[in-house]
Image (tube, rainbow, N blue to C red):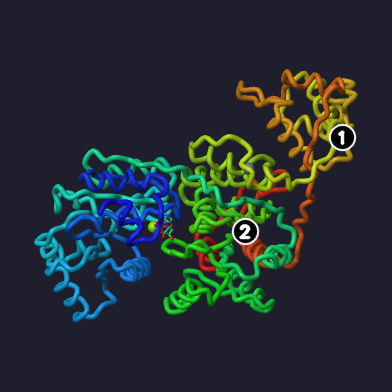
Amino acid sequence: MNSLQALQKYFGYSQFRHSQEDIINCVLNKQDVMVLMPTGGGKSLCYQLPAVLLNGLTIVISPLIALMKDQVDSLNLSGIPAAFLNSSQSTDEQRDIAIKLSNNQLRLLYVAPERLFGKDERLMAFLKTLKVVQIAIDEAHCISQWGHDFRPEYLMLAGLKREFPGVPVIALTATADKLTQKDILEKLNLTRPEVFVSSFNRANITYRVQPKQNSFKQLLRFLSERKEDSGIIYCLSRKSTESLARDLRDEGYAAAAYHAGLNNDVKAKNQEAFLRDEIKIVVATIAFGMGINKSNVRYVVHADLPKNIEGYYQETGRAGRDGLPSDALLLFSQGDAMKLREFAKVENNAQQSAIMLKKLDDMVEYGQMHRCRREYLMNYFDEHFPDNCGSCDFCLSEFEKFDGTLIAQKALSAVVRLKERFGINYVIDLLMGSKSIKLWAEHKLLKTYGIGADVPRADWQRYIRELIARGYLRLSDDGYSALQLTDKSEAVLKGMEKVELITSQHIEEKDNDELTFDNELLTLLRKHRQEIAVGENLPAYIVLSDATLLEIATYL
Ligand code: ADP
Ligand code: MG
Ligand code: ZN
């Protein structure tokens, strides 16, 4: 039987996806491989199919018991003999499995790394007497401290090549982060591994961002068109997952909360019910996700701002694993960004905190930008994507536009008057007629002083960013980031070219329905604030005592 026949016979699929076939061929040729494929890409098949074709045992290292059980159940249903070994089993069950292994009756054995390399060396000694033909390491990013799911027990896997010399190892992960990828390769000691990188683009997911105004009403509107669908709603705090799940139940939705603070039985129960479609909506913190092998999740909503693009992309990737059209919706608010910024600042390690802030800035940019979201995401992961993906809110032209020629002319002439020597905020000060530059501007007889006073500052910022993105303005690269004209500017100034801008969506930040959590937390922060320097409406920095940090940590 060849690979394609096995694919059809055991897995019921007509063709391979991505580079599955090449990967499988490598394994069959006894080469080490590392597979980087997005969530839902079809990684499991890359070792399951060779396991069927090779005459011997495939050991699969996997981090979660729930994950092992799912996979083993579905393999057995497809007629592929597989089992897992873990601490939840009785001695009898374990003995049964050992007998089957000795008789060469199992094709795949799932096991956790700490079991394989644990104090009890008998399992390892036993496995070494068997004909092991392949070792697969699922969720291989767990070996890296750089990743988001570091598991110290994964470090033990460095010993695999020594224990099973000559047996091909296949490491698989959906992590898109370059640093983590390098780390995985180094830690696993693979022999001249063949690395397969699939595009991380998830073509079947449509990305949208809405300014968060009244998140509950926005959610109900979104859900009303998706009553029969399964979905995940991510919130930042445990508390809000519970209250939102309750509110959704009151509206008749089968929703349940999931977070790390719930006891294991409740978590397992909710997860099972979600897999069986008894619960349609899981309202969760980021604790929910890895190992949720549910292919028909139709949407992922972020009701609060994620901390960075990596997390956001990973979480949205849980939608549409079956390849059918799915939605990702982010409710964006500056208030969330401010809160996350405060958390990032109170990190102990200054370098860590700087990285977190930088990543958060990217997330905020994504939430506010008006350009193709897929292009931005792909660029973020160093992948090129031609603009206009056809399935994000920008490419679908869901933003309302207006004739912004006059606005553009005002901005451009302010830049001219300032001789292209000042940055965005100063140009806006001039346009808005800011008191702080009144004397200066009048002294210099600048006619543009105050000509844009009717437009709110936040809108000016957005318009100018848009003008930059569209090439009507640029930022100098001499380190001063002064606004300057481009060769496209003149036509606009002379009225020969029209400029369309996106209509402001007037974000109402003060919404009582949703800000309860923020308020409580902010009160707590305020109560313990020892020193505050207030910059432009934002607390510039906050110094907190250890006791307060502890209090906030327990609150979360
Ligand atoms: P990953 O581990 O990469 O997140 P999985 O291995 O769980 O993804 O596969 C995701 C889904 O894609 C599963 O439902 C799987 O059965 C399906 N799948 C895998 N390969 C193919 C294929 N060649 N054709 C169709 N569906 C596939
Ligand atoms: Mg997987
Ligand atoms: Zn797009």
**Percent of width and height locating residue 534:** 69, 47
The residue at which mark 2 appears reads as 304
| Up-down relation of residue 14 to residue 421 (above or below) | below
Dot 2: what SS? loop
The front one of 201 and 160 is 201
- Residue farthest along the left direction in this orientation: 129
The kind of residue on which mark 1 rests is Gly
Can you tell me whether the CB of the residue at mark 1 lies under 8 Å from the nearest atom of ligand 3?
Answer: no
Residue 476: % across, % down = 65, 22
| Residue at the image position 82 percent from the left and 21 percent from the top | 417
Q: In the figure, is residue 525 to the left or right of 83?
A: right
Residue 434 vs residue 458, the one in the foreground: 458
Q: Nearer the viewer, mark 2 or mark 1?
A: 2
What amino acid is at disc 2? Asp
Q: Residue at x 68, y 53 (%)?
A: 333
Q: Quadrant of ligand 2?
A: bottom left
Q: Position of residue 322 (x, y in %)?
A: 49, 58
**Residue in view at x 12 percent, y 69 percent:** 103
Above or below 269: residue 113: above
Give the numbered dot on residue 534.
Answer: none
Q: Residues within 10 Å of mark 1 (few under 14, many from 20)?
A: many
Instruction: Tell me the crowding category of disc 2: few under 14, some 14 to 19, or many 20 or more residues within 10 angstroms, Cα based.
Output: many
Q: Can the viewer see residue 547?
A: no
Q: Residue 452 got which mark?
A: 1
Q: Is residue 120 left or right of 400 when viewed as pictured?
A: left
Decide if residue 30 is in sight here.
Answer: yes
Q: Earlier in the sequence, mark 2 or mark 1?
A: 2
Relative height, residue 83 to residue 483 (above, below):
below
Residue 483 is situated, as x and y percent measured from the top left of the image, at 72, 25
Query: Distance of mark 2 from mark 1, alpha carbons?
Result: 33 Å
Residue at (50% x, 47% y) in the render: 353
